[in-house]
Image (tube, grey):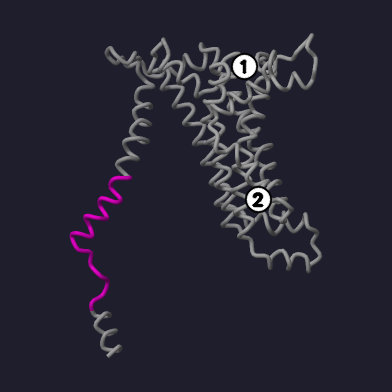
């Protein structure tokens, strides 16, 4: 009897979907696709189109070609400081906060005492929005009533950590890194838990030190986590907005491309076409970083 049943199943071939099955699949796949098109790709394509126009949001659209981009690169003083700050944001989170989060993950993976408490404490900033982190930064770095100057105790010549354009970007980066480190730590900690212990044992038998074992055996196995962390780091750096806007509306040394987009589109100027051009530049920079990183990682996987 089982042999007969197997033969019948073999004759029937693959199961055909009924009209009800196709309808369910269409709904389950169609709704997310439509939402993605409406909320992500629709506004993206609209911004690209509007970047070649002059529009105040009310009157008629006027085609201006590349004039918005020409003015942006040559006659808009906040643009290049904002580009510099965004690139500095990427570098700081990528070269300081991310390695530090990896270091914390490695230490916690060793099973130190009170590791659960440390995990919860270090991850706690991640649940805070960047706006809240900005308010916390003000409480710490404020010149007159900040906790840092109170600890330093120099009341006659307090340091203006937030008001000084040569210092405030670094203070804000420290606050952003405080939040980003916990996120990276959790991701790497999850990756380290999935590493096969036999790999470490084999490396130890071959005479590799703990450091050599980590960089030559453990870290290569974390390549999928590296991809996720790299993409998240770039996205977090380039979409930063809340923290600087909460401190001083992204001015006086804290200019960012995201703030310039908001100032031109939502502000009194209502230069939607010009603001869209800034948004397109931000999109291009983001895609450039992410695509380059992903290509390098995929090439590394093929070689491996």
Residue 66 x/y as whole percent: 41, 19
Is 142 on the left-hand or right-hand side of 134? right
The foreground one among 159 and 233 is 159
Local secondary structure at mark 2:
helix
Determine the residue positioned at 56% across, 43% down: 293
On the rendered image, what quadrant is the C terminus found in? Answer: bottom right
How crowded pointer 1 is (Cα within 10 Å; few <14, some 14-19, many 20+) is rated as: many
Disc 2 target residue: 116
Q: Give the extent of the magenta segment.
A: 12-32
How crowded pointer 2 is (Cα within 10 Å; few <14, some 14-19, many 20+) is rated as: few
Upstream in sequence: badge 1 or badge 2: 2
Is 19 on the left-hand or right-hand side of 33? left
On the rendered image, what quadrant is the N terminus found in? Answer: bottom left
The foreground one among 16 and 243 is 243
Determine the residue positioned at 46% across, 16% down: 263
Determine the residue positioned at 51% across, 11% down: 75
The foreground one among 5 and 231 is 5
Residue 122 x/y as whole percent: 65, 41
Count of marks placed on residues: 2
Disc 1 target residue: 253
């Amino acid at each position: 009897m089982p042999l007969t049943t197997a033969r019948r199943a073999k004759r029937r071939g693959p199961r055909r979907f009924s009209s009800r099955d196709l309808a369910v699949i269409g709904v389950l796949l169609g709704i997310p696709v439509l939402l993605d098109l409406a909320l992500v790709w629709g506004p993206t394509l609209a911004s690209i189109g509007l970047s070649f126009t002059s529009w105040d949001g009310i009157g008629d659209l006027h085609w201006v070609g590349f004039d918005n981009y020409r003015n942006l690169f040559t006659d808009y003083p906040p643009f290049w400081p904002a580009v510099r700050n965004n690139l500095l944001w990427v570098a700081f989170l990528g070269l300081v906060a991310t390695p530090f989060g990896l270091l914390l993950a490695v230490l916690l993976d060793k099973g130190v005492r009170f590791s659960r408490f440390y995990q919860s404490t270090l991850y706690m900033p991640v649940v805070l929005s960047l706006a809240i982190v900005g308010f916390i930064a003000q409480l710490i770095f404020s010149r007159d009533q900040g906790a840092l100057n109170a600890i330093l105790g120099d009341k006659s010549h307090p340091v203006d950590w937030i008001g000084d354009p040569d210092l405030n970007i670094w203070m804000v980066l420290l606050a952003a890194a405080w939040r980003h480190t916990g996120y990276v730590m959790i991701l790497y900690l999850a990756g380290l838990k999935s590493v096969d212990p036999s790999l470490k044992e084999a490396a130890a038998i071959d005479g590799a030190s703990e450091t050599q074992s980590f960089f030559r055996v453990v870290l290569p196995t974390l390549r999928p986590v590296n991809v996720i962390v790299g993409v998240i780091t770039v996205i977090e750096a380039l979409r930063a907005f809340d923290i600087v806007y909460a401190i001083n509306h992204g001015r006086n040394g804290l200019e960012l491309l995201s703030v310039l987009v908001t100032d031109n589109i939502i502000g009194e100027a209502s230069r939607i076409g010009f603001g869209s051009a800034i948004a397109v530049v931000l999109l291009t920079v983001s895609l450039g970083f992410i695509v380059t990183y992903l290509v390098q990682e995929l090439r590394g996987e093929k070689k491996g």
